[in-house]
Amino acid sequence: MSKYILEMNQISKHFSGVKALSDVNFKVEKGEIHCLIGENGAGKSTLMKVLSGVHPYGTYEGDIVFEGAVQQFNKISDSVKAGIGIIYQELALFPDLSVYENIFAGNEVKRGGIIDWNQTIVQAKKMLEKVKLDVNPDTLIKDLGVGKQQLVEIAKALSKDVKLLILDEPTAALNEDDSENLLELLGELKRQGITCIMISHKLKEVISIADKATVLRDGQTICTLDAAKGEIQESIIIKNMVGREIDDIYPKREKKKAGEKILELSNWSCYDPQLGRQVIKDVNLHVKKGEIVGLAGLMGSGRTELALSIFGNAKSYKLHGDLVLNGTSTTLKHTSDAIKAGIAYVTEDRKGDGLFLIQDIKSNISAANLKGISRKGVINDNEEIKIAENYKNSLTIKASSLEQMTGNLSGGNQQKVSLGKWLFVGPKLLILDEPTRGIDVGAKFEIYTVMNKLIEAGMSIVMISSELGEVLGMSDRVYVMAQGEIKGEMKVEEANQEKIMQLATQ
Amino acid sequence: MNLFKELKTLLSENIREYGMYIALFVIFLTFSFMTDGLFMSSRNLSNLLDSTGYIAVLAVGMTLVIVIRHIDLSIGFLAGFLGAITAILLMHAGVPMYITIPIILILGIIIGLCTGFLVAQVGIPAFVATLAGMLIFRGALLQVTEKTGTIIIQDKAFNMIGNGYIPSLLEVNGLHLLSLIVGFLGILLYIYSDIQTRKNKIKYGFEVISKEIFALKVVFVSAIIAYITWILAGYNGFSWTVIIMVLIVVIYHFLTTKTVLGRHIYAVGSNPEAAHLSGMNVKKITYIVFGSMGMLAALSGILFTSRLQSATTTAGTLFELDAIAAAYVGGVSSAGGVGKVTGAVIGAIVMAALTNGMNLLGVGISYQYMIRGGVLAGAVIFDVMTRKKR
């Protein structure tokens, strides 16, 4: 029998014409901890979804060989039956059910079709011992901390006789103690003979725990590093992660000296009462007139949270620290206050919380500034059409008419409508959250060109982006965030992909 | 031939909107035919519209509540309760009518704002909050009418609201002149606003329907208004109830289509998160919509009490469900952000016409309920199907 428990050979996967994975090879030896590393969108999650049967057999090309046999997983339960357990970043637990109910949810201990609760509790205790979690199985999930919830998830996977355990960024939401605890447990499971695949952005963890590490980039396998050969080092990993060519698709802009500070945050901290944790920690940041500030970092590093906390505290965090706008300390209590103060925020999720998809283009463009097209609360339809027409032309929104529903537009055109809506507000500071996510190259270029025009007109832009090329190509200055903190600040001339990635993966 | 083609595409593109009018037309035609014209007689039509009034105003408010993705189950008994309070103020406390009515309307607004508080501020699901309200107002209605039972109202002016007609000024061949004038003004207003809209659209290079079709549409709608006016003028003319109903629809139609407030309501309904991030105050909108619902419930209570000329212990029973049904038949979507107040009124008339027509035909009450239920389900199925197609 081969030494590999899992071999994924030549895996390719398309999403409506876009290649997400191309000829990926991924081999995992029995009993090792194998880390899967890559930027956002490199294809890690897609690969794991192919493996676990979320993308069923036949929707991808290539072979999955698990324990020496070619597998054809048609649904998730097939992979579970084969002994593959996957734990996602967002935990799939029922908060109002007890620990033991959760461990055996979907896999109930039955006798004659009726659940044997006593046996369930006995078995649950065994599983909890295995993951070294010392809680009463009667405890409700919602009364446990995130770290312990994670352990319950692992116990749940173990209860299904898992041979290969996959963890998707298991420590992303954990504090340091809980993270350490979890990594220790993984070591323990390894001794028990369970193979682990871990997706992680924290390179320190990877270095401390991994036997092997495979780097993915743009849907391709770049390399597999071996700890035994001393290859798992920060510099080597980062070099392989960021090796992407930067195309010269960024329109040139004459660099001018930036003006006075229009926004300054000092010791800015945000506590999210819903998540029950600190999302932003002690951030110091400023934006000057006429510059593009890049806010780099990986997903979940707190960039969006930071933007929303500036934009009228849109998520109702508990705020600490000082926000200074144009030299005066200010409190913005509502998004409308922020808009009045000249701040606009173009969301990363235009379909979710950006656009009114069932409304037409013109109502979307006017939505944030209805005052600008109305008198005494009565809307002037003609004025609205005129203004919407202007933005349609200047942003080259391609649509049959201004009365087309935004839900029917392409991603790029939707993004332009979203941008038009905020330009109509006439902001001094424009926060763009992932402005080019999911749109084609042509539309990207057009959006960059608009950004440059705005800067020349004296606006300031904060650009949140996961694309390093975009950050380096468009910004004047770059902040790098990780775990809710600013990990570094640099002028774009001093920045490069390795530097940013190193700070972002701390 | 070309004209016919355009008419066809126009119909298929706007099937959802026109579907309701077509359904109404078919129902009216069918009943007139089956009752040998009795259904479309002056007297019956007048009665039909008067009995729609108190549900129609509720349906208008309910439409907005559903547009912002909530529901209000309390309005039926709220209307009954406020109707009883009206009767008590008028008959027992001796408060004159012109003071009583504003008091009741304001009381309605305050109660609506309380519901708004529970939903927007405390975060209770509207279904539960208003279910509680429904029980409370039912109890309150029983409480205030406990000693007296049904309260008979002898205030003639007040009873005019639900039973009276606008003065006729002069009768011309048995037709009421003022009603004819009102109807004529209505037609002029309609034609003027339609031409104005069309002109604007042409000015901005928007696609408009061809001249012939436009003319056809204007003539058709005008003819319908004229016909209804003529029929009503032949009996007692426009009733106060119809005038109030039309006023409410015109005001709410203007508010929802032409004002910033209206835009905010539909924005909150279609995507609350996006509305919040666009600087809109979602809570404030929730308050306003429930406040307006409360006011309209008060108005409904006044209309109903006046129509019966008394406040009964069971007034308002199931009004809320009739209003919800009317709103859904009128094309409101529970996914939020879609629904017109004009549609709600048409929906209310459709449901009332069914009841009225079946009563004339002598259809048993058991079948009436089943048929109305079928029509409601059919309307919503039609709505879902036509939405999917787009």
Image: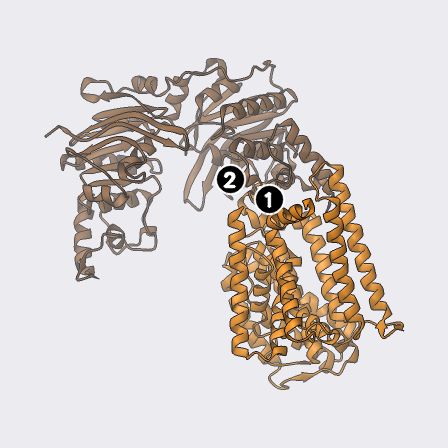
Chain colours: A brown, B orange
Q: Secondary structure at mark 2?
A: helix
Most extreme residue toward the left, as rendered?
A1
Q: Where the C terminus of chain A falls, by quadrant? A: top left
Q: Chain of mark 2?
A: A
Q: Residues within 10 Å of mark 1 (few under 14, many from 20)?
A: some
Please state the total of marks drawn on the protein image.
2
**Is A246 on the left-hand or right-hand side of A57?**
right
Q: Is residue A63 left or right of residue A456?
A: left
Q: Does mark 1 fall on the same chain as mark 2?
A: yes
Give the quadrant of residue A262.
top right
Q: Check disc 1 and report the residue beneath it.
A: A359
Q: Amino acid at mark 1?
A: Gln
Question: Could you tell me if residue A260 is visible in this image?
Answer: no
**Residue beneath label 2, please?**
A351
Residue A58: quadrant of the picture: top left
Name the image quarter holding residue B177.
bottom right
Residue in the image at 24% along x and 43% along y:
A154
Give the residue at the far front of this rendering: B1
Residue A356 vs residue B357, the one in the foreground: B357
Q: Tell me the element at label 1.
A: loop
Q: Nearer the viewer, mark 2 or mark 1?
A: 1
Q: CA distance from mark 2 to mark 1?
A: 12 Å
The amino acid beneath tag 2 is Lys
Circle on res. A367: none
Q: Residue at x 41, y 45 (%)?
A: A276
Give the chain letter at badge 1.
A
- Residue B14 placement (x, y as % from top left): 62, 50
B72 lies left or right of A480: right
Residue A431 picture location, percent across and down? 55, 30
